[in-house]
Image (cartoon, grey):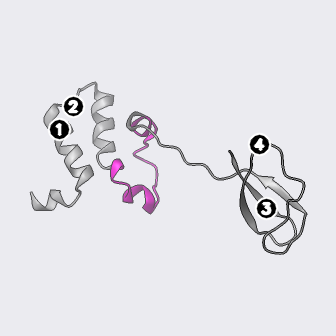
């Protein structure tokens, strides 16, 4: 059963509704103001990028937002990209150290 989001054209309220089919119900009304002038909207979606997708799309010259630096999966992208560009296959030791830093960034200060 799909969950659709609707936006009220009167007050702007957005509400999610669980439907037993794909057609809008006849008695659909805004939860906030009671208006029947509501429209189905496209909900936000999330997707997961693979590590190879992140590596291929990484631009070392680009400015990144704080959220980029808060995502530990981005640690070492520059080093990985430089190895890839030079045709060097990263060693297992390099991969292990990179994974350790990604899972526990403070470990670099401990070691």
Tell me the quarter of the image containing the C terminus.
Answer: bottom left
If you read the primary sequence from the N terminus, does the residue marked by circle 1 or circle 3 appear first? Answer: 3
If you read the primary sequence from the N terminus, does the residue marked by circle 3 or circle 4 appear first? Answer: 3
Q: Quadrant of residue 52?
A: top left
What secondary structure is found at the residue carrying circle 4? Answer: loop
Please tell me whether mark 1 or mark 3 is closer to you in this view: 3
The residue where tag 1 is placed is 94
How far apart marks 2 and 1 lie (CA) works out to: 6 Å
Residue found at the far front of this picture? 20
From the viewer's perspective, tell me whether residue 95 is left or right of residue 70: left
What secondary structure is found at the residue carrying circle 1? Answer: helix
In the depicted view, which residue is nearer to us: 94 or 26? 26
Is 81 within the magenta?
no
From the viewer's perspective, tell me whether residue 28 is left or right of residue 59: right
The residue where tag 3 is placed is 7
Q: Is residue 78 above or below residue 10?
A: above
The residue where tag 4 is placed is 21
């Amino acid at each position: 059963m799909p969950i659709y989001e609707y936006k009220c054209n009167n007050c702007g309220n957005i509400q999610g509704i669980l439907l037993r089919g794909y057609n809008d119900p006849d008695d659909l009304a805004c939860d906030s103001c009671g208006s029947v002038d509501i429209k189905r909207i496209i909900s936000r979606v999330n997707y997961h990028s693979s590590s190879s997708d992140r590596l291929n799309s990484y631009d070392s010259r680009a400015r990144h937002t704080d959220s980029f630096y808060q995502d530990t999966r981005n640690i070492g992208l520059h080093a990985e990209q430089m190895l890839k560009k030079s045709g060097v296959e990263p060693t297992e030791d390099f991969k292990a150290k990179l994974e350790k830093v990604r899972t526990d960034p403070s470990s670099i200060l401990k070691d």
